[in-house]
Image (cartoon, coloured by chain):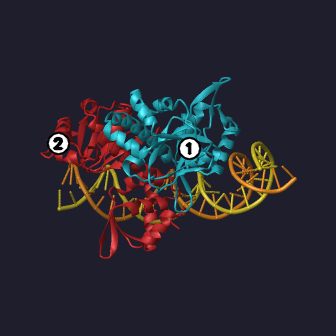
Chain colours: A red, B cyan, C orange, D yellow
Amino acid sequence: MKPARPTADLAGALAALPHFQELPPELLARVAAMCRELELQPGELLFHAGQRCDAFFAVRAGLVKVFRTAPDGREQVVHHIGPGHTFAEAALFHHGIFPASATAVEPSRVIRVDGALFLRLFAEERGLGASMVSSLCGWLHVLLDRIEVLTLISAGSRLATYLLRLPAHEAGGTLVVELPLPKKDLAAELSITPETLSRLLARWRERGLVRVDGRSLALLDVRTLQALAESSAAGE
Amino acid sequence: MKPARPTADLAGALAALPHFQELPPELLARVAAMCRELELQPGELLFHAGQRCDAFFAVRAGLVKVFRTAPDGREQVVHHIGPGHTFAEAALFHHGIFPASATAVEPSRVIRVDGALFLRLFAEERGLGASMVSSLCGWLHVLLDRIEVLTLISAGSRLATYLLRLPAHEAGGTLVVELPLPKKDLAAELSITPETLSRLLARWRERGLVRVDGRSLALLDVRTLQALAESSAAGE
DNA sequence: CGGTGCGTTGACATTTCTCAACTGTTGTGG
DNA sequence: CCACAACAGTTGAGAAATGTCAACGCACCG
């Protein structure tokens, strides 16, 4: 967790965060003054569950995994956070304790916003409340979607739903999506084992539903995938 | 969804909500003026997913279920909401569309806070922002817990975790918890089938872990239940 | 008294996890 | 430059858990 030398456009990066939309520049500057930038290597721990929460974070580049470690050693992924998103605000405002741990999946650069300073600013500047409310609501919807995926019974529908929600780009007449994370982490996010994920993709490949090339997937038969996503049956 | 005649202590009920902690009485009164009270019979729909969101709600008495209906007709429970808790605020602030449906599980009385009026008040009175931020964070933690439970692999650990988190009271030397909802709804919340739930409780009863009497459960062997909650193994 | 809905129990089919071995790639150190 | 270790991903075989379908008891309510 090396401090990185601050980038010139820190305020600009902050302004792009959902939290700070429509915030006057002078307030942005005050927030920027509370920030430090950090470099994280894959596997490096940013904070761990139970630790006192003295900051919240924004991902600038890379990918950060938020997870809990179950008593039996199993890792429960709460969420993966990509560039332009913040996390741990809820801990700061609510408990003052991190409810989960965070680590980098890829080499990452994160912005650390000092908790004590931010809370003080928040108390003074009531305007901050409104912008944070709307971004917290956004978080709520994200978690809601995740719950929706998790309550899907079959691994196949979970995976199909996930794939179809990924931003897709067209190439040569077919939809192509890029997995934003390694397959093993994707499996964890879907709460299935890497083996099942591998087997599902293999089956779908044989059936001509997808073409797999590393992390990039061509969705060859979107209709059938949609049917799988909606059905409670397995990969069939 | 019959309108109920307003109760005298409406402002008092509002003041007890997490949203409106530490709110000056005059603001509370203004919020109270935006409210209507409703009576709901079991199964009665309060709103459905996709509908325009023109209000948010607080449960006064009874139990309300928030759920989505999956394309295959399956019902996915997002959460059950008991007295003293609010819901649909996120929809109001974020999308303006209900992301889920809500219905009463038991005969219920809910407070409906008009959305348009509340948003206007929210814009004027910046003080509202702070109190709502903290309550939204509370919601985030609730959903986080729910995700944690859902990622627990075995039905047994899900159930045990759920039971152990229930408020317990002591009776005759043993811990007793009351299920806040019918077993069939509990099963839905845990994302298992009613049959599995029934079988789990039967097994645990035979092993002397619990004693079941309708909705009231005596936890006879808390240590083993904790072990089950933490283990990834099944009910064994 | 008959209906309706919850909860229980049984038999069965199916999916997914577990354990294990094997491949391919990457990166390190001799 | 090569050998080796470390790790992600794949594939196989078997076990175990949960879902499905079906029938039944039981309460509650008209």
Chain for disc number 1 = B
Q: Nearer the viewer, residue B169 or A181?
A: B169
The answer to whether dots 2 and 1 both sit on one chain is no
Q: In the drawing, does residue B134 fall left or right of residue B77?
A: left
In the rendered image, is residue A73 in sight?
no
Q: In the drawing, does residue B152 fall left or right of residue A112?
A: right
Across and down, in percent, residue A202 comes to 43, 67
Going by the numbered disc 2, the residue's amino acid type is: Pro
* Number of other residues with Cα within 10 Å of mark 1, as a class: few under 14, some 14 to 19, many 20 or more: many
Going by the numbered disc 1, the residue's amino acid type is: Val
Asked whether the residues under the numbered discs 2 and 1 touch, taking CB atoms below 8 Å apart as contact, a structural biologist would say no
Element carrying mark 1: strand
Element carrying mark 2: helix
* C-alpha span from label 2 to label 1: 43 Å
Q: Is residue A187 above or below residue C7?
A: below
Q: Which residue is mark 1?
A: B64
Across and down, in percent, residue D29 comes to 75, 46
Q: Which residue is mark 2?
A: A25
In the rendered image, is residue B176 in sight?
yes
Q: Is residue B176 above or below residue B101?
A: above
Q: Nearer the viewer, residue A130 or B229?
A: A130
Quadrant placement of the C terminus of chain B: top right
